[in-house]
Amino acid sequence: MTTNDHDIDGKNELTDALRWQLRAQRRDTPPARDLWPDIAARLQSQPQRMAPPRPRWLTPVALAATLVLAVGSVGLWRGSVTPTADAPVRATLVQREAEGMTRQYQAAIQEMGAGQPPAELQPTFDELDRNAQIILTALSQNPDSRLLLEQLRRTYARRLALAQRVAYA
């Protein structure tokens, strides 16, 4: 005698009986009569709401307004005034964020009042300051680089953390 996974304590007839009952449950029964004529009659009896016709002039006016809006937003996006040698170039969002971050960093260093670091840590401070200047120079050449902005943030955070350790030690 082989055992079945569905066999409960060796009573195979219970499993077979249950299986046959489940198969008997599935029966498709068509409706007693055709339902479509009643559905069609109900649909026809409902009042049909017609949308008021749109004026014929509305489509060309809407198309022209969309075109003006598109051209205007492209003009604003590209900058309406081209920079000349006399006019300063507008700073991008990343550049403004970097400038704000630099001001906050300098204010935090002044507020901490960190004096001269120990001689053994001076090369580390110098290296972090040099890296910050390199990143700021790179940001002036690539003003929209979020990667450089994030690297500047990390460099300032490391420099501040090191200055805090020196100040509170």
Image (cartoon, rainbow, N blue to C red):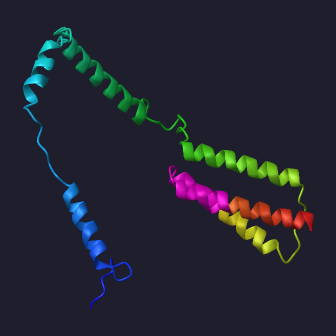
Point out residue 105 in the picture as x, y percentages from the top left corner. 75, 52
- The image quadrant that residue 156 belongs to is bottom right
Residue at 88 percent of width and 67 percent of height:
166
- Indicate whether 70 appears above or below 45: below
Residue 154 left/right relative to 15: right
Q: Quadrant of the N terminus?
A: bottom left
Asked if one can make out residue 116 in the rendered structure from this viewpoint, the answer is no
Query: 67 or 123, which is in the foreground?
Result: 67
Q: Is residue 57 a member of the stretch shown in magenta?
A: no
- Indicate whether 105 appears above or below 71: below
Point out residue 131 in the picture as x, y percentages from the top left corner. 66, 65
Point out residue 28 in the picture as x, y percentages from the top left corner. 14, 49
Asked if one can make out residue 76 in the rendered structure from this viewpoint, the answer is yes
**Which residues are the magenta region?**
133-154
Q: Is residue 135 a member of the stretch shown in magenta?
A: yes
Residue at 68 percent of width and 45 percent of height:
100
- Indicate whether 90 appears above or below 80: below
Point out residue 55 in the picture as x, y percentages from the top left corner. 19, 8
